[in-house]
Amino acid sequence: MVRSVLFASAISALAMGGALAQTAVKVGVLGDRSGVYTDISGEGSVVAARLAVEDYAKIDPSVKVEVVSADHQNKPDVGAAIARQWYDRDGVDVIVDGVTSSVALAVNQVTREKNKVLIDSGAGTADLTGPQCTPNTVHWVYDTVALANGTGGAMVKRGGDTWFFLTADYVFGQTLQRDTAAVVTKNGGKVVGSVKTPFPTADFSSFLLQAQGSGAKVIGLANAGGDTINAIKQAGEFGITEGGQALAGLLVFSSEVHALGTKVAQGLVLTEPFYWDLNDGTRAFSERFSKQMNGRKPTANHAGVYAGTIHYLKAVSALKGEAKDGAKAVAKMKELPTDDPLFGKGTIRADGRKIHDMYLFEVKKPAESKGEWDLYKTLATIPGNEVFRPLGEGGCPLVKG
Amino acid sequence: MTTIFGVPTQALFGQLLLGLINGSFYAILSLGLAIIFGLLNIINFAHGALYMMGAFVAWMLLTYLGLGYWWALGLAPLVVGLFGILLERLLIARLYKLDHLYGLLLTFGLALIIQGLFRNQYGVSGLPYAIPPELSGGQRLPFMFLPNYRAWVVVASLTVCLATWLVIEKTKLGAYLRAATENPTLVQAFGVNVPLFLTLTYGFGVALAGFAGVLAAPIYSVNPNMGADIIIVVFAVVVIGGMGSILGSVITGFALGLVEGLTKVFYPQGSATVIFVIMVLVLLVKPAGLFGRTA
């Protein structure tokens, strides 16, 4: 009896020795798989995470990664419940994607409470690295301040100094309007009015008419996804752009421009940190992504899932067994400089903000476009340290302390 | 300039007109639902999915076969109607003897499946569908810029609603239909093929949804969720009008479009909720709906 117990413990010790040499982590892709953001998140995010795991296996094969995914249906309560279950029961170490601001803020709190990691690439709210910042969250791709600085600043400089906002009536739309209005006023422009639209809205004609009546030079679309598509489509119908008013898409992803087609979307100015056709690195990634996604090109959010996962795995390799401590993993991520083929070299600040360049794009005219995904021409590159909110101004407690 | 509650009257006229246009969609969709409920006693939750299908069929006709908007206006309702007939024969017909709830669950499940299939194939961002060249551009009215296409939507939907109402109220076929609604057994005893009537009625009801889908394709985003977004509102319209009341559903459809349009001026945030508030009030005061008969 005693001998068999000894034998058993010897075996388990051996088994544990084997396990120690390998670090196992579980990545949870939490996104919208059925609602308005499915095309910027959804299965594409899972594909991006898998590609990251595949590529990282070549760098450090000792890290074993499992990828799971779920649909938060754009509901904060659903998102928080999934995060809790993943952390408590299913052994998930890191949540990526996290599209939709309201859900992201909820998951942000759960992640801190459970001391895990959230690498949010899909959500827009700059509060994630502002008042709501935590030692467990990294905000990767963009935020409302950067979009405001990019598109808002550029439009005012081009003469669009009076603004009317169509604002999606939830946290994302409101912060986007607030941040853009601040940039517009700072650059000498003026906000003449705004209207809060229910989320989601199919018919914008009434709101567009109000915007038209305001006489503003620029109509700022502080919304996203299907709302933006409907608004742009109907603006064309009501002759808004022909009447001399410009549309500013404050958050537009390439998948949406693709859905509109260049005929409807031409001339639209927007800010994005990623476009599939930027350089050889982005093209190679997009090629692989496309093959698994029915020919679709990746959006900035998908690129963020890929790059964020790679960088997290680098921190895991550096920490070995300690990676299960979420705050430590994020601290390591902030310490290591970021470098990936999609966003280039960059850093993660103390407040969790990932810093990289953003680009001001204009949608091509149908005559300039060579294929259905040939959508943008680059107007300007905006350096990371100019486009994102300065470290001290966000009100993040981590920075003050 | 004269104003009402701080809103210029001219702007108000514009908003009312837009409300009427949105009401057109509510009217056609709720008309189909009312016919189906009136005759089949089925609460057709798949209606939104079939409306979406109408828009997608229009897109497919253009993309794969090169057939434009006017073809789609005739063909898409036909395709959706045939699909509906198939559904009715294979699945829905088996539930007539059971409680309403089973029909609701079945059609709700069908809606999820149809939407899921389209989402898998086409994603959610939607597909481009242009306004036909004959109807692009618009008129500059004294109080607003009215796109020609929107004017066409109101005309088309009013015509279809009126024609449907005439057929049901004024023709022999309509008389059979109404009789079969009232007492199917007796009507069958007179030698009328009631099951065939039921099938064709379902086909026609969903063809109306397909027609609305084609009307919507050039102005709304053509995506798999477009039906799910509108169907809840349309159900509220049917409940307010009175389940099964054909004229009621059309009038309520247009009226609620107007109410929604007004809300978009005075309190835009509430425009998604106002119809449901009205529904609650109507149910409290008149549980059978404004035009419904109390059983």
Image: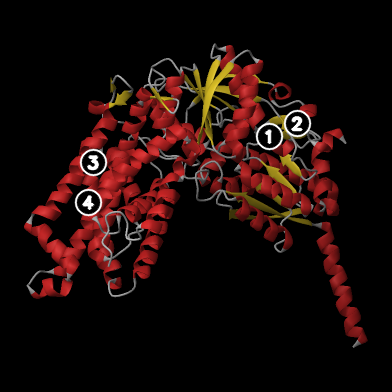
Chain where mark 2 sits:
A
Q: What residue type is labelled 1?
A: Ala
Check disc 2 and report the residue beneath it. Answer: A394
The answer to whether mark 1 and mark 2 are in CB contact below 8 A is yes
Q: Mark 1 lies on which chain?
A: A
Disc 1 element: helix
Q: Which residue is drawn at 33% across and 28% down?
A: B13
Mark 2 lies on a secondary structure that is loop
Q: Which of marks 4 and 3 is nearer the N terminus?
A: 3
Q: Is residue A2 left or right of residue A241?
A: right
Tell me, yes or no, whether dots 4 and 3 are on the same chain. yes
Residue for badge 1: A126
Residue A154, x across and y down, in percent: 59, 17
Q: Say what secondary structure mark 3 lies in.
A: helix
Q: Tell me the residue that label 4 is attached to.
A: B247
The C terminus of chain A, quarter of image? top right
- Answer yes or no: do the residues labelled 1 and 4 have beta carbons within 8 Å? no
Of the two numbered discs 1 and 2 on the same chain, state the one appearing first in sequence.
1
Alpha carbon separation for disc pair 1 and 4: 51 Å
Q: Residue at x 26, y 53 (%)?
A: B32
Q: Which amino acid does label 4 sit on?
A: Leu
Q: Residues within 10 Å of mark 4 (few under 14, many from 20)?
A: many
CA separation in Å, label 2 and label 3: 52 Å
Q: Which residue is drawn at 68% across and 34% down?
A: A126
User: How far, Cα to Cα, is label 1 from label 3?
Assistant: 45 Å
Mark number displayed over residue B157: 3
Note whether residue A137 is visible. Answer: yes
The chain identifier of the residue carrying mark 3 reads B
